[in-house]
Amino acid sequence: MDRCLSMNELIDALADAFKALQQGQVDMPLRTALPIPEAQANSLMMPVYMSSLNMSGVKVVNIFKNNLELGLPAIHALIMLFDGSTGQPLALLDGERITALRTGAVCGLASRYLAREDSQVVAIIGAGIQGRSLLEAMMAVRPIRKVLVIDKDLQRANLFISEMSQKYGVIFQLSDTGQLLEADIVCTATTSEKPVFDASHLTAGTHINGVGSYRPQTQEIPEQIVSQAKIVVDLKSAALKEAGDLIVPLKKGLISEERIYAELGQLVVGEKAGRSNDQEITFFKSVGLALQDLATAHLALQKAQQQDLGSEIFI
Ligand SMILES: NC(=O)c1ccc[n+]([C@@H]2O[C@H](COP(=O)([O-])OP(=O)(O)OC[C@H]3O[C@@H](n4cnc5c(N)ncnc54)[C@H](O)[C@@H]3O)[C@@H](O)[C@H]2O)c1
């Protein structure tokens, strides 16, 4: 997958996908969550049809957070692609890598509109699989020179630093949330159910990308920050169903729905402006959409065909 996809190309492909969504060329029912209570896990079914790509697809993603204790990734996923004219199967792809790539890439796209152009210091809270991809996306869209790495598990934070410092020639610093004042961009990609930093740790002008909370009761971002930030979501209907970071403060009456400033597609088509000054705190909340998977899988398939990668299977 990594041989055929570059982060910048992927961010551009997602920009096209969000534009298509805005123009009514995407049919994407809200995903179905199948709880697997015995394993404290969730299986998500994510179907989508994009007429702009003449393709439909579905991802099944299993989120088993207790897998960490078994030394296994928390996420396992497969994506199937189908021809939009005939319904014929086109490809079966590794959904784990695509999930990570598109989760980073959508934050890269949002950061193009919301992070200050001169953002040089990024904090990654949650040094896991999504955290790696978020870093890749931030490196692609802003002139990053320093990365603050924060994880409750020091071993994972150190592993992240040793891996990522081989890839990027910038400064890596093992940090705690008290050092967030230095950050221009804060990315949260944790499995936490409670806010992962204190509101007092953030400074004016910071942009936040939050991807970890995807259930109505889980939060990563302090309510005080959510209630003062310019909030952009990937899709309002999905965020209002799944994003605890917004749902909890909404239920408490700390914010109203009108405080959600825009959907990402509105920024992409120019219907709404992104950041308006150097002082505002901006918050992009993504719960992850099937269209991101389809757009990423479509690009991967195109590139694999061009480069003669992948295997043909007969079923
Ligand atoms: N929004 C999306 O599109 C999207 C896509 C994929 C995954 N996710 C979610 O993102 C989260 C991270 O996924 P992942 O695959 O990177 O998981 P991962 O297990 O690889 O990494 C999560 C990391 O967060 C750390 N962590 C947990 N609580 C913390 C805390 N309070 N403070 C600091 N670090 C903490 C863990 O130690 C771990 O290193 C999960 O909740 C997952 O469901 C969201």
Image (cartoon, rainbow, N blue to C red):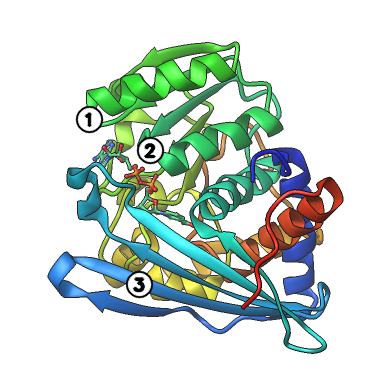
* Residue 249, percent from left and from top: 32, 62
Q: Residue at x 29, y 22 (%)?
A: 176
* Residue 180, percent from left and from top: 38, 25
Q: Which residue is drawn at 58% across and 19% down?
A: 167
| Local crowd size for mark 2, using a 10 Å CA cut-off: few (<14), some (14–19), many (≥20) | many
In the image, taking residue 288 as reference, residue 249 lies left or right, namely left
Question: Callout 2: helix, strand or loop?
Answer: loop
- The residue under label 3 is which amino acid type? Ser
Determine whether the beta carbon of the residue marked 2 sits less than 8 angstroms from the nearest atom of ligand 1: yes
Question: Callout 1: helix, strand or loop?
Answer: loop
Q: Mark 2 points at which residue?
A: 128
Residue furthest to the bottom: 86
* Residue 215, percent from left and from top: 32, 66
- The residue under label 2 is which amino acid type? Gly
Which circle, 1 or 3, is nearer the viewer? 3
Q: Distance between the residues labelled 1 and 2?
A: 10 Å
Q: Is residue 236 above or below residue 213?
A: below
Q: Mark 3 points at which residue?
A: 43
Q: Distance between the residues labelled 1 and 3?
A: 26 Å
Say which quadrant the C terminus sits in: bottom right
Q: Distance between the residues labelled 2 and 3?
A: 20 Å
| Visible residue check, residue 112 | yes
Residues at discs 2 and 3 in contact (Cβ within 8 Å): no
Q: In this view, does 132 lie above or below 272?
A: above
Front-most of 228 and 304? Answer: 304
Q: Name the residue under label 1.
A: 153
Question: Callout 3: helix, strand or loop?
Answer: strand
In the image, taking residue 231 as reference, residue 303 lies left or right, namely right
- The residue under label 1 is which amino acid type? Asp
| Local crowd size for mark 3, using a 10 Å CA cut-off: few (<14), some (14–19), many (≥20) | some
In the image, taking residue 19 as reference, residue 247 lies left or right, namely left
Mark 2 vs 3, N-terminal side: 3
